[in-house]
Image (cartoon, rainbow, N blue to C red):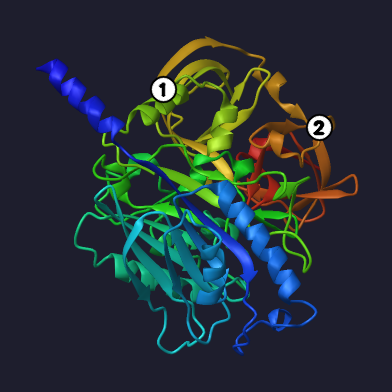
Amino acid sequence: MKIILILLCCIISLNALNFKVASYNVENFFDLKYDGTEYEEYKPSSKHWNKNKLKIKLKNILKVINHLDAQIIALQEIESQKALDMLFDKLPQYRYKAFLKNQKSSIGVGVLSKFKIISTNAITISKIDLYSRPILEVIFKIDNFKFKLYNNHWRSKRAGENERIKYAVALKNYISKIDDDSDYILVGDFNSNYNEWITFESEKKLNNTYGITGINHVLNTVINDKLIIQNDMLNSNQRIHYNLWLELNKEERFSTIFRNQKNTPDNILLSTFLFDNKNISYLDNSFDVFKPSYLYKHNRITRWNKNSGYSDHLPIIASFTTDTNNSSQYIKDQNSIANNNKLNYLYEKEHIRKPIALKNMVVIYKYQNGAILQEVKGRSIYVYKCVDDLKIGGIYNLVVNDVQLYNGLLEITSISDISLISVVKNYKTLYKNASKIDIFDKQYINDIITSLSGIYKKRYLYFKDKKIRLFFSKNVKLIKDNTKITINSGHLSIYKGQIQITIHKKSDIIEHD
């Protein structure tokens, strides 16, 4: 009987279908028919947009789509059905298409598919704002299963977050009415970073919503200031979504570069149904940014420049399967995580799926609510609140159960299996001498620095023609302006992208007369 069951599972897996879904903002693909809604630089038969330039742009978009080789591709910034048809006619592998645009808008969204499209629907953002861009719902039939895709192109950051929240609310209200367990994904150009609630907080023009964002708080990619991770997907009674940017290391998270700042406006958000091992499932760790050398080279994206180039966005892509036994890759990845005992892994991932064992960690600093752990000849990390069983100078093996990113600072928030190996008295030798390192180098974040002297004034320490922000914990009394101080043990930290020194205890600094 067991043999029959095993053979049956193998047959089902052999018949399972794997497929890829991509999203690509092609950057203003216009036809040559004048409609009156064109951007100025894309009016037909002008020096900026004519038959020759259209031919080049079309050829380049086709090249990208062919190389992506996705079964479904969601496109943004397509001017018209006619423009989409130009692509469709040159891509015989795609048998189905869909397009949506507000008549008064300059651009719309489209979908090309190798799978049958059962139906399409438009999600209206506002009946008053005639220029808002509706969200395109496309329902596919894949291996006899329903698969829903929502193609988005939200309002740009020329407007505040309140405008993007309108898109998020319209989308949330629509999908909340889905009464079955349909597998669905939210894709497209959301004009929002995966961690938008952090990146936009200090930008007054954008943050006109008291810190609330559409992508994070309305679509629930964040709960209680923590990004949703895979472990959360089947353990929540809310309609939450997992953002696939979390699959990549931090330095790899970008699909655009604006003013030397890497951003993630293009997103793929997964519903919980894609993790239940029924019908269609996400293929774990398949998400990627498509960046061959012709699209991205020397830290530059080869965007369209009126005569050549591609787009100011890079395509993103992920894979899915109808194999209901799709758990091996996840388990394999979990095991590799559990065996990784380097702090660098935590700094790369920002979140963990399974507890991680750390060995030979030295407690080099401790105060009431926190501690600093350091690898010998390695990095340091901040432990917040769960420090009662840690002694200063202790060398421990322990297990990290959870971490969080608080305003840019990585913190361990839960530990267990704490085992004291030994105790050292000279732990302060692991402090970093501020005169021998560049304290503004992010590799030293969460280190304890010493021997830094200067003048304190208006929350900054001025030293050697430089300045760095000082943050004092609630139990530490502020010192007077124009006081000369020396930092004995300052916690080098970061707050919303700005390097600072946190003073946790009064003894961390010496005031000079």
Task: Give the Cα separation between the discs numbered 1 and 2.
Answer: 36 Å
Residue 370 drawn at (x, y percent): 52, 35
Q: Nearer the viewer, residue 51 or 132?
A: 51
Q: Which residue is mark 1?
A: 335
Please determine whether, in this image, residue 140 is positioned above or below residue 155.
Answer: above
Residue 169 drawn at (x, y percent): 38, 71
**Extreme residue in the left direction:** 1
Q: Residue at x 74, y 70 (%)?
A: 53
Tell me the crowding category of disc 2: few under 14, some 14 to 19, or many 20 or more residues within 10 angstroms, Cα based: few
Residue 310 drawn at (x, y percent): 69, 59
Quadrant of the rendered image containing residue 234: top left
Q: Is residue 313 left or right of residue 346?
A: right
Give the number of the disc on residue 437: 2
**Which amino acid, mark 2?**
Ile
Q: Secondary structure at mark 2?
A: loop
Give the number of the disc on residue 357: none
**Extreme residue in the top direction:** 422
**Extreme residue in the right direction:** 465
Please determine whether, in this image, residue 86 is positioned above or below residue 260.
Answer: below
Q: Is residue 464 left or right of residue 33?
A: right
Please determine whether, in this image, residue 1 is positioned above or below residue 452.
Answer: above
